[in-house]
Image: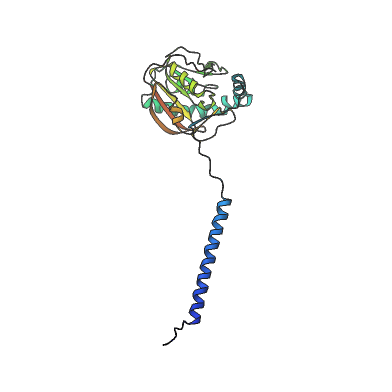
Amino acid sequence: MKKLQIPIKPLLLLTLSLSASLSLLSLLHHHHQNSSQNAPPTPTIPTTPLRIRRNYSTYDAYLHIQLNKTLNPSLRHLWTTRDWDRKVRAFSSFFRDLLRLNLLIPSSRCLCVGARVGQEVQALISVGVPDAIGIDLVPSPPLVVEGDFHRQPFEDERFDFEFSNVFDHALYPERFVAEMERTLKVGGIAAVHVAIGRRGDKYSANDLFSVDGLVGLFRVSEVVRVRRVDGFGLDTEVVMRKVRKSGGSNAVAV
């Protein structure tokens, strides 16, 4: 009976091939472990669509911070000079679009909430909607009167249209929205510009991570449309229509 003879050279090559494969697998495993250890941490996904910044010990402290911005001489000079024309043009474009859709009409009684020096009020007048006024903590006559958007100084159901781009400054967002609904007539329109998922400046009192965080605050209104806009750092326009009477002055304490 003949003995089985395996050639030495092929056996050696097979052994070397297996050894190389095992080494390669070991290197790949080691690289994967190192990559996992060196990878940046996974971003934390907010669990709520709206987050309030707890930076204020009292409501007066909150107002003080907001007034620091509103009364800043450099900012007020900027708002009334170099910024004036470009912002009036941009707001006019937004309002013309709403006019085209009959969400705003020339006879609408309008309120601009948190209007600073009144560029959006001037824009409404410029597009043919003359019955317009703004409110802000600091008045800017004749376009803006003194008023806190948490406590609007108007009776129920006064306005046909309300606009705001300062939702992120509301310390009590539910009160902000409730006051808009209270002073809107049934059938009236609220248009709000917000930034989604983008942290505001140091004066912002809340951060909005989805449209639901705003829409969910409206109690007697329905969504008309949501669209992307380019509004001075704000990227989303939410338009709501009041469909029934609200309960009057909101009981949320401020």
In the rendered image, residue 144, in percent from the top left (x then y), is placed at 53, 17
Image quadrant assignment for residue 205: top right
The quadrant in which the C terminus is found is top right
Q: Is residue 32 in sight in this rendering?
A: yes
Q: Nearer the viewer, residue 68 or 209?
A: 209
Q: Residue at x 58, y 55 (%)?
A: 34
Q: Is residue 44 left or right of residue 186?
A: right
- Residue farthest toward the front in the current orientation of the protein: 1
Q: Residue at x 54, y 26 (%)?
A: 169
Q: Nearer the viewer, residue 109 or 82?
A: 109
In the rendered image, residue 189, in percent from the top left (x then y), is placed at 40, 22
The quadrant in which the N terminus is found is bottom left
Q: Nearer the viewer, residue 125 or 56?
A: 56
Q: Is residue 70 in sight in this rendering?
A: no
Q: Residue at x 50, y 81 (%)?
A: 8
Q: Nearer the viewer, residue 232 or 20?
A: 20
In the rendered image, residue 158, in percent from the top left (x then y), is placed at 43, 14
Q: How many numbered tags mark residues here?
A: 0
In the rendered image, residue 200, in percent from the top left (x then y), is placed at 55, 32
Q: Is residue 223 left or right of residue 57?
A: left
- Residue farthest toward the bottom in the current orientation of the protein: 1
Placement of 229 over or under 145, stated as above or below: below
Q: How is the image coloured?
A: rainbow
Placement of 1 over or under 232, stated as above or below: below
